[in-house]
Amino acid sequence: MRNREELFQSIERKSSFLCVGLDPDMDRIPASCGTGVQAMELFCKSIIEATHDLAVAFKPNLAFFEQYGAEGWSALERVVAHIPKDCLIIADAKRGDIGNTAARYAQAMFQGLGADAITVAPYMGEDSVRPFIDYQDGRWTILLAMTSNSGAQDFEFHGSPPLFERVMMRAQTWGSPDELMFVVGATRPEAIVRAREIAPHSFFLVPGVGAQGGALREVVDAGWNDQCGLLVNSSRGILYASSGEDYAEKAREAAQVLRNEMKAILREKT
C-alpha cells in the first residue's frame, strides 16, 4: 500500500477502512494475559490475530512499549512483525525535531522498525518533516493537523485562519497526497469539512470514534472523497471490549460492528 490507489484497493478488498490502534495499557490488559512486557506482547498479538481480516491498518502507540526500554522495544518489533503484510503499519510516534535528527527518526521507524507510516508533529516546519517525506520506498508521513483531544483548542483552533488550516495548506507544498496524510479528529466533524476542502485528495487518519465520542457516519459525511480518503482508528473500544479471557473474541465482535457499518457505507458510496 505504497500509494493512495493501493490503499483504496485494500479498502475495497476488505470492505473496511478500519485502523486498529494498539495502545496496550497494563492497567487494562486482562489478567489472563499474565504480567509485564510479555503480557503486553501476547495481548497485542491476540488482538491482531482476531481483527486483521477486518482492518486495513494497525497503529501501535510507541509510548506503551518504549516505557519498558529495550525489553519493550523488542516486544514492539515482534508485534510489528506479527501484523500481516496486507495491513498498513502506522508507527504512532508523533516525532518532530530538526532535520538531521528527523532523518534518524525516519531511519529508525521505516528501516529499523519496518513501519509503513509514522505520525509526525509539524510545528517546527518543513525541515523537520522533509526527511520523512523524502525517505525512499513509498512510506507515508502523517502530519498532526486537527486532533481529537480537548487540548487541541489551545493552539490548533487559534488564529485566522486557525493553525490547523495553516498547517494543512502549507503542507500541500511539501509533498503529494501519495506521501502525506493528516490526523483529523472525529470529535469535530464541522472542522473535518474544512480539512477536506483544504486537502481534497489526501487520506485522513481519524482518531476519536467510539470511546472519545466521535460518530462514524458524521466522519464519513464530512470527510469522504472519491477514494474513501479515511482511515478511521479505534483503540479502546476494540482493545478493551472485555476484561475477561474472552477479550480477543469480544475485540473481534467490536471490530466487526465497525467494519459492518463501513461495509455498508462503501456499498453506498462506491
Image (cartoon, rainbow, N blue to C red):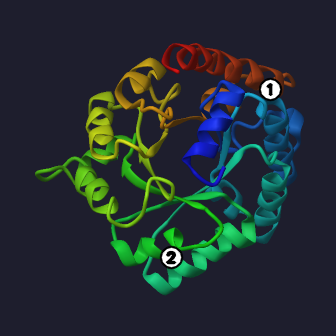
Q: Which mark is residue 143?
A: none
Q: CA distance from mark 2 to mark 1?
A: 39 Å
Q: Is residue 114 above or below residue 60?
A: below
Q: How many marks?
A: 2
> Residue visible at 64% across and 29% down?
12
Residue 227 x/y as whole percent: 50, 35
Judge from the rendering whether residue 131 lies leftward or rightward of residue 199; answer left or right: right
Amino acid on which disc 1 is placed: Tyr
Residue carrying label 2: 131
| Circles 2 and 1 in contact, beta carbons < 8 Å | no
Residues packed near mark 1 inside 10 Å, few (<14), some (14 to 19) or many (20 plus): many
From the viewer's side, name the closer residue of 220 and 21. Answer: 220
Residue carrying label 1: 247
Q: Is residue 223 above or below residue 105?
A: above
From the viewer's side, name the closer residue of 204 and 37. Answer: 204
- Check disc 1 and report its element: helix, strand or loop: helix
Residue 117 x/y as whole percent: 60, 57
> Residue visible at 70% across and 36% down?
28
Question: Disc 2 or disc 1, which is closer to the eye?
Answer: 2
Residues packed near mark 2 inside 10 Å, few (<14), some (14 to 19) or many (20 plus): many
Amino acid on which disc 2 is placed: Pro
Residue 266 x/y as whole percent: 56, 20
Judge from the rendering whether residue 236 lies leftward or rightward of residue 96; answer left or right: right
Residue 54 x/y as whole percent: 73, 28
